[in-house]
Image (cartoon, rainbow, N blue to C red):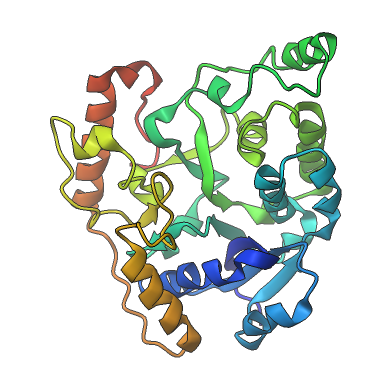
Amino acid sequence: MSKSSAIAVLSDEGHLEMTKHILYSSYVYGNWQGDYILLAHNVRDQSKLQWFYDRGIEVLPTHEFANVDEVFTPQTSIYYSKLRLFHPDCQRWNAILYLDTDMIVQWDINALVDQKGFAAAYDCARFPLIHQFSPRDSRLSEEEYAEVARQLIGYQLSVPAFNAGMMVIDSRNNSIQRYESLMNLVERFKHISTFGDQGILNLYFQNRFIPLPYVYNDFFQSDAFNRDGLLKRNSCDDAVILHLTYPHKPWNPESSFHTRWLEYTKKSEYLFTTPQLGKSLPRWRLWRTEFINAYNQYRTGLRKFWKKSDYL
């Protein structure tokens, strides 16, 4: 029997091993009570999916996005597979929590899916939306680029963008209209959306997403303005979900989180038979981290992109 919500992760055939630690940490430390989904991007060797089938994880192939490899670079084409989660056949879940595989869950995350709509946290440093789009693509002529850029008129490009590495998708509201609207935006802006789906989703959900606190998409490893700011964060202990991007992914031996990644990957063999240890982050610690993050951004000149989270 399907539960009312699910966690979704994404991988191609060569990176399936990199999903296991996020599944483990979200179950054990995130105390996750819902289903799990693997978006399998162009996985042709079905035997490599057996580990997921054996553990009751829903595998959703994303072969319909295979043709984008001719348009996008391999590094960005896979990200568009996330849009599969907005298809109406995902309405069987009321909400889907999407997590990038370079994340580690540390605290209970079940309350995230109680949102009344689509929700995400602002991108690190709250860069403005214009940052999501490249000034030029060599595959476009000057006339073609001018036409694409013209279509951005009407969007608020100076507002801060959210990060699509962690999203709460109100999949109960999925419809063919929503899905086709997203596909239309991909077709219009695919050549200049620097981070793939992220720019597209920011255009679609502009002025109608619920901002989540920083701790739910916490860039502690790379946010020097917090680690070295006037108000310092001395540890990542208050991060509910760590997002380990620059400088090292957790599977990189040079990452300070590599040992933890190895441990969680090994223990994932016993996924769903391991006791759940998740606790909720105390509210005052969430507020403290949110204040430190906002203050340091304001102090370092990012104040014009700062606004209070509606979630608090």
Residue toward you, 251 or 280: 251
Image height of 241 relative to 2, above or below: above
Q: Which residue appears at 80% of the width and 39% of the height?
A: 183
39 vs 141, left or right, is left
The image quadrant where one finds the N terminus is: bottom right
The image quadrant where one finds the C terminus is: top left
- Residue 128 spot, x, y in % from top left: 49, 22
- Residue 231 spot, x, y in % from top left: 14, 34
- Residue 292 position by quadrant: top left
Q: Which residue appears at 63% of the width and 77% of the height?
A: 57
65 vs 134, left or right, is right
Image height of 77 relative to 254, above or below: above
Q: Residue 127, can we see it?
A: yes
Q: Residue 28, can we see it?
A: no
Image height of 268 relative to 164, above or below: below
- Residue 158 spot, x, y in % from top left: 51, 16
How many numbered circles are shown?
A: 0
Residue toward you, 41 or 173: 41
Q: Which residue appears at 43% of the width and 55% of the height?
A: 249
Q: Which residue appears at 83% of the width and 48% of the height?
A: 176
- Residue 24 spot, x, y in % from top left: 45, 75
- Residue 201 position by quadrant: top right
Image height of 6 relative to 244, above or below: below
The residue positioned farthest toward the front in the image shown: 254
